[in-house]
Amino acid sequence: MKRLLFCVLTLLCLITLLASAEEPFLKFEFSHDASESVQKGDTVVCTVKYSDIDPLGLSSVELTVEYSDGLEYNRDASATGLQSAWTLWEPNVSEDSIKFGIVDDSVITPGVKDMTLTFSFKVISEGFDGEYIRITENNIYDFDINEVKNVAESINAPVFVSNLPETSIENKGASLRINNSPALRFGAEITSIPANAEYGMLVIESDKLVGELTHSTENADLLELKPLAENVFVTDACAIASNTDSYTFRPFVKLVTDSGNDYYLYFNTLERSAEQVALAELETETDAEKVKMLKAFCSDT
């Protein structure tokens, strides 16, 4: 009897788990095509998709989008894939948001076909500032007029900036200090940079790096770049523990937007070890004493 009861309870748990793992009612996607930086006069297009809709169908969808004051709505919303009797209502536009509605006006045609909504903004900002387009309300109703909660969402609408000042930095690699204690210096060529910008080099032992090297990277060192020659800047020498240990390094610039927020620009990432630098310098070095010292960093010379 106890064994039978156990089997019944197990079956009930299994049924409950299967019910909770039901397929999403539909897939919702929201994205825009803005690059990381836009200029005044550019157009940013937004795309909204409702797909893989449950056979029960939809009665309506409502979407509210908020946008920054550096953008201007182009009043060009359009919807494709709508079934007969379905309508894109005239959007309700306020100073910083838009409410869209796609509705079955007949009340007898369940929405089961994929639908796509598109609309766009013009960049009107005069200055360097952060811009955004984001969802504040997303209401979806099935054909029984119940709000749908089980939605598979895919949202790709990152913030971006307008009128980014011209900035150009190239990672020039590393050089090796061979006298005294061995050390590496990291360099960059700066050809264009805004006034009052801050710049430097991020450095980390490569085996400690997880993901992309940025200011949020744990264990990364932030090094000052100092002028060496025209447009050429280098860090102070960094002591190394091993000739073969690799270091990943990346120059950056910190700007401040018109709203007072920090904005970081990151440039190309390189990786070097003392041995790699020594081998490269051996290709051009002719001084016998320096050649001897460089070879000491190389395991196969």
Image (cartoon, helix red, strand yellow):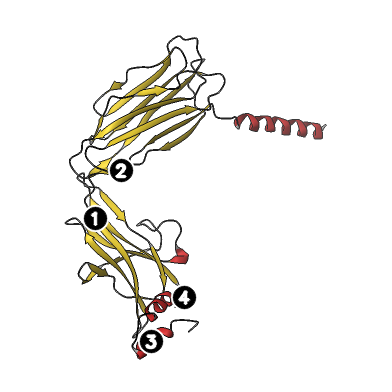
Circle 1: residue type: Thr
User: How far apart, in angstroms, are the residues tagged by discs 2 and 3?
Assistant: 49 Å
Q: Are marks 1 and 4 in contact (CB under 8 Å)?
A: no
**What residue did someone put label 4 on?**
244
Mark 3 or mark 4: whose residue is earlier in sequence = 4
**What residue did someone put label 3 on?**
291
Judge depth for marks 1 and 4 and give the one in front: 1
Circle 4: residue type: Thr
Mark 2 or mark 3: whose residue is earlier in sequence = 2
Judge depth for marks 3 and 4 and give the one in front: 3
Judge depth for marks 2 and 1 and give the one in front: 1
Secondary element under disc 3, as helix, strand or loop, is: helix
* Image quarter in which the N terminus is found: top right
Mark 1 or mark 3: whose residue is earlier in sequence = 1
Secondary element under disc 2, as helix, strand or loop, is: strand
**What residue did someone put label 2 on?**
160
Q: Is residue 18 left or right of residue 45?
A: right
Residue shown at 28% from the left, 24% from the top = 75
Q: Quadrant of residue 174?
A: bottom left
